[in-house]
Image: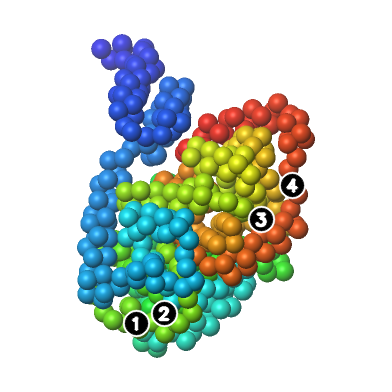
Amino acid sequence: MLDFLTQYWWTIAIAINYILVIIAVATILFKSINPTKTLTYIIVLLVFPFFGLIVYYFFGQEYRKNKIFNRKDVLNNHLIQSIHKDLKIQPESLNLYEPKIDEDQIRLIHLLQKNDKSPLTKFNDVEIIINGENKFEKLFTDIDNAKEHIHIEYYILKDDNIGTRFLDLLCKKALEGVTVRLSFDDVGSKISSKMKKKLTNAGVQYFAFMPVLFPKFTGKMNYRNHRKIVIIDGEIGYVGGINVSDTYVNYPENKAYWRDTHLKIIGESVFTLQTQFLTNWNFVADTSLTLNRSFFPQNKVKTVTPVQIAASGPDTDWANIMEAIFFAIVTAEDYVYITTPYFIPNDQIITAMQVASKSGVDVRLLIPDKSDSWTAKHATNSYLEQLLDANVKIYRYEKGFIHAKTMVVDDVFTTIGTCNMDYRSFNINFEINALIYNKEKAIEAKAIFNNDLESAIQINLEQWTTRSNMKRIQEAYCRLWAPLL
């Protein structure tokens, strides 16, 4: 028997592999998931022995997600219900809003309220911030003035130059008696043991989101917290694309210019950011905070800027942000301007952009000229020709790397947040965007987009179709992996 196993071990291993593959394929086929994603998994399983099973184990199975996040979803519902009941944070009747909200905006608002308990808030001051150096100047001032609490949630947090300043300031505030709660993603972040000890000694409460054994080697392991949120005293909120790392600040010594967009919000929508932070904190800390009025103080803002916070992740029933983006595109009448660093869309978004453009809407897409990911770049390129065929105008940003995640529509609607235009942001990662229903902010966001176009070059369809066959092969290969990127 031993001789037989020794002689035919490879044949036996392959046979076992494909028995498991057959079981996995049957499981995939019985799931109601995207056909493209289904086909990708089946091809990987059949063509790559053993490796395919590893990929499927880490990226394709849902039972791990269900086991992890069912409890989080229960916590979310319980906490949100408590906040709405005890603190009476309810959206006002839409017909009371001035200026009036148009019918398509109202339909989008109802979509999110139904899907993710996202109340529309009326009284807000919203400031669009360009680039990390401007964000951190404002953020550090607001943190230094904190009196009650500072709540923080980041995908990337590193104790480099800007990160050390940030963390040192948190220690200072904690020692002054301000409650500091910090959550950071374990894969995206890198904080030294020395700094963690300093945080502990200062009284900063911190937890890593879903710790992994070897963060350096996990790459894009599933279910990461990609959000960037700061809430200060329940009154000031920050949300957008800028993480805490020197990469996001344009120091003179940096090799590349980094173009990004963030929001500072004062007003009622900070309550929704606070709610999202608290639901995450209950999950990472494995405890339930006692709600108190300091988390949701009396709003002092009188400026009318309707804002809705859309959050999505593997613990939500719907792809809330993707649905909001899709709906805004298909209901656009004049223009849709999109900026994203990673464009690996699903069929719904591609179709929405094509239909909008062919119906006469000015659809423009701004992406980086040089990407920080070879695979993502070629996967993105594989989608461009079908958009160019539909007369979508596509631009490549050449001044540096553009990391902003924004969309502005018809001078009436703007979204800024953490969500990329890709499979991972739509379906896997935890994301959060602010939806702003305000003409002034939409015009400002449009001006910012047009200013970025001055540092971009437009892709010409005729020239694009003459690219080499080698590039097309690279694109086809990378697109095969698109649902997994």
What is the x, y in percent for residue 428? 41, 47
The residue under label 1 is: 297
Identify the amino acid type marked 2. Answer: Glu
Disc 2 and disc 4: Cα gap in Å? 41 Å
Identified by mark 4, the residue type is Gln
Q: Is residue 154 visible?
A: no
* Residue 275 pos. (x, y %): 33, 68
Query: Which of pointers 3 and 4 lies earlier in the amino acid sequence?
Result: 3
* Residue type, numbered disc 3: Phe
Q: Nearer the viewer, mark 3 or mark 4?
A: 4
Residue at (55% x, 51% y) in the render: 332
The image's colour scheme reads rainbow
- Nearest the eye: 269 or 60: 269
Q: Which residue is mark 3?
A: 401
**The N terminus: image quadrant:** top left
Q: Under tag 3, what secondary structure?
A: strand
- Residue 25 visible here: yes
Distance from Cα at disc 3 to Cα at disc 4: 16 Å
Look at the numbered disc 2 and give the secondary structure of its residue: loop
Mark 4 closeness class: few <14, some 14–19, many ≥20 residues within 10 Å: some
User: Are the residues tagged 2 and 1 within 8 Å (C-beta)?
Assistant: yes
Q: CA distance from mark 1 to mark 4?
A: 47 Å
Residue at 44%, 76% (x, y): give it: 123
Q: Amino acid at mark 1?
A: Pro
**Which is nearer the N-term, disc 3 or disc 1?**
1
The residue that mark 2 highlights is: 235
Please give the name of the residue rendered at 47% of the width and 49% of the height, measured from the top-left corner.
327
- Per the image, label 1 sits on a secondary structure element best described as loop
Vertical order, 324 against 485 (above or below): below
